[in-house]
Image (tube, rainbow, N blue to C red):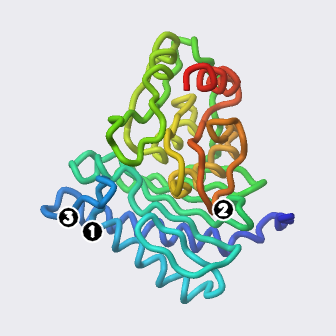
Amino acid sequence: MLRYKMKNEYNEYLEFAKSIALYAGEVMLKYFNAKDISKFKGDKSIVTLADTEINSYLIDQVKKTFPTHSVMGEEENFGSSNYVWVCDPVDGTMPYANGLPISTFALTLVIDGVSVVGVAYDPFLERLYHGVKGEGSFSNGERLCVNDVGLSDKRSLGHSVVLPKTHTINRFDLTRVNNALHEKTMLLSFYSTTRTAMAIAEGYCNFSLLPFIGKFNHDVAAVKVIVEEAGGIVRNFNGEEDRMDGNINGAIICNKVVYDEILKILKDNL
């Protein structure tokens, strides 16, 4: 079983992750609104020059700094280890490629399947988020805390990704779920799980649903530690913990007030 290090012993990993995040932000801004930066992959998802450049840079830096560690990037992997750097170079590639400034970079150190250090960076707002297991989560040094807003509260605002059934990475038909949620609350969709999750950690939103199964841990790994250290909950669609170095079974990201009700809606409508 993983024995967590005492306070401050993760600082080396955190500072490394922050430095990668700031570099990634520069790359994202460099290519933002540039022409011919994106292409479609085999699963119909989009990849940009920013995605590949950031992913490659991370691998180079891990090789130099932590050669016994491995990397699981959305675009490229390196090595095999129980110390894994899980990376989403540009979370929200679709809006990014279409000139919408709502995308983020996400990086996590996962040890034995558990997210212990996570960072997310929004270069457009210059907000650097981080969370460390057992030590809280922060945005530009300010402590983060989820809200206590319920689903039926007029302040409730949630996020749910909606994709056509024909999309090859869509494993869940959320139509009934979203209809049930719409009866209680407002829904939006940024197509960036990390960006919405940071809004949850900040207390602006109260839940988000990620309806994918399989190799989508890069969407959730950083979110897991940052949101939970802000007092929230991150579980799969069965209400279970997923390892953050392997396949996931969807993700519920939320405050503690709405969790049970959202889980029931999922079980009743999927």
- Asked which secondary structure carries label 1, the reply is helix
Crowding near pointer 3: few (<14 within 10 Å), some, many (20+)?
Answer: some
Find the residue positioned furthest to the left: 35
Which of the two marks, 2 or 3, is nearer to us in this view?
3
| Residue wearing tag 2 | 117
**Residue drawn where x is 56% and y is 51% of the image:** 220
Looking at the rendering, which quadrant does residue 235 occupy? top right
Amino acid under label 1? Leu
**Residue drawn where x is 83% and y is 64% of the image:** 4
| Quarter of the C terminus within the rendering | top right
The answer to whether residue 252 is left or right of residue 185 is: right
Amino acid under label 2? Val
| Residue wearing tag 1 | 49
Q: Is residue 67 above or below residue 140?
A: below
The answer to whether residue 241 is left or right of residue 187 is: right
Tag on residue 37?
A: 3
Q: Is residue 229 above or below residue 18?
A: above
**Residue drawn where x is 62% and y is 24% of the image:** 262
Q: Where does the image place residue 182, in percent across and percent down from the top left?
A: 46, 15
Task: Report, in whole angstroms, how far the alpha carbon at label 2 lies from the one at label 3.
Answer: 30 Å
Of pointers 2 and 3, the one earlier in the residue sequence = 3
